[in-house]
Image: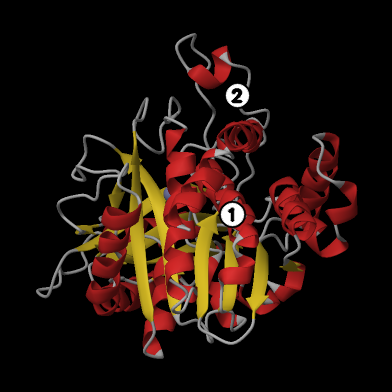
Amino acid sequence: MYQKIIEYAEALDGKSRARRRDFHKYPETAWYEMRTSAIIAKTLTELGYEVLTGKAVCLETERFGVPTKEQLDEHAALALEQGAPADYMTEELKQGFTGVIGILRCGDGPVAALRFDIDALGLIEDSTPDHRPYTEGFPSQNPGMMHACGHDAHATIGLGTAEVLMKLRDHLHGTVKLIFQPGEEGAKGARPIVAHGHLDDVDYFVGTHVAPTGGPDDGDVTPGTYGSLATSKYDVHYYGQAAHAGGFPENGKSAIVAAANAVLNLTAIPRHSAGISRVNVGTIQGGTGRNVIPDHAWMQIEVRGETTEINAYMDEQARRICEAAAAMTGCEVKIVPQGASESQHSDLDFLKQIGELVREHLPQLKVSSCENAQNWGSEDISLMMNRVQAHGSKATYMRSMTDMASAQHTTAFDFDEKVLVDGIETFSVIVYDLLKQDEE
Ligand SMILES: [Zn+2]
């Protein structure tokens, strides 16, 4: 059967490359993944999956940073223009309820969930002649949006895995859940899926991220990772009182002075002795004119911590400082959460089991010598893993290595599409092994 899985996956090579290029050409950032979600829902439905979409995927009250209705309407029209299957462009999807879950029920047995993030980044893609998406005709058609982290690969691997697992269904005992998550960038999309309860019945949970060969991982697959930084992200708005800066300054309350006090004091949060922490004010805007006391200023800030506890410390300090800066100047403050994730670890016995499985049944793939590698970014897959592990089940977050043209999150990013079949094989073998019982 393992040989068959390899054959099924390899047969999807051409289709997967084409599919990845289509996703790459029409990238969509958080809550705009309408065309992407509609294509995923259509593909899973046609394969025979039970498909959840819209509010059945993301709990309405738990979404961060949703664009305005006008922005969503505009993008929905664009998605249709760009070939989103109209039958799957539901009203909820047009309101930014993106993300899809495909379920395959194969009788009694464990529940195995796989997570694939599907969103793009806010970047303008490189248009120089040595950037392959340009020379081969699939550069981003959506200015300011680009698949520069490889989530086009993840979505493609998810759909290929769905196709292989459907072929194996008579040999599976249990339930497969394929979670296509929106809004990973900025840590927005996992929380409403977790809050909906989709991880509560999961016995085994696996995700992966493409990563560069030549980095710390020396193989094709690293079966586990740990240590993503926990993070909290928010917009902070100050509302003051406008006044003539020359005539009646005493009547004004400066929102910019409030924001400036916050910035200086945020950078003065004492470091935590238990581990690393981060704080950044990424943007600041405010005011309307030189001679007007500014009545509005706002900034985008984030804190991070090596552990969920250290991040909670940074978060508490930052909020207190933002509030105190308002009190100092008599302004009002509004803190609007925009994203959150926790620190994460993979279960050692589970990742070792996966390492063995790849070594034994996918000999064409090399397992990295460090089977459990460290992460230094933030990833909201942590929320899903922590929920699964909280009820005693197993989770791991892998890495899938591939040659890259440029670092992730840069405008010249591209990767060797060989990783698509590698990923499909890896996930299919893992699920088959977990749900096959003792057939062979
Ligand atoms: Zn990513």
Q: How is the image coloured?
A: secondary structure
Say what amino acid the circle numbered 2 marks: Pro
**CB at mark 1 closer than 8 A to ligand 1?**
no
Q: Which mark is residue 139?
A: 2
Q: Nearer the viewer, residue 247 or 163?
A: 163
Q: Residue furthest top?
A: 129
Vertical arrangement, residue 17 with respect to residue 28, above or below: above
Badge 1: residue crowd in 10 Å (few <14, some 14–19, many ≥20): many
Q: Which residue is disc 1 drawn over?
A: 164
Vertical arrangement, residue 21 with respect to residue 380, above or below: above
| Residue 333 visible somewhere in the drawing | no
Query: Quarter of the image holding residue 392?
Result: bottom left
Side of 92 where 218 appears, left or right: left
Badge 2: residue crowd in 10 Å (few <14, some 14–19, many ≥20): many
Residue under the point 40% across and 74% down:
385
**Residue 63 at what x, y percent from top left?**
62, 70
Q: Residue furthest bottom?
A: 391
Residue under the point 74% across and 66% down:
53
Q: Nearer the viewer, residue 377 or 253?
A: 377
**Residue 143 at what x, y percent from top left?**
64, 30
Q: Residue furthest front?
A: 440
Query: Quarter of the image holding residue 104?
Result: bottom right
**Residue 307 at what x, y percent from top left?**
24, 73
| Mark 1, secondary structure of its residue | helix
Q: Nearer the viewer, residue 170 or 25?
A: 170
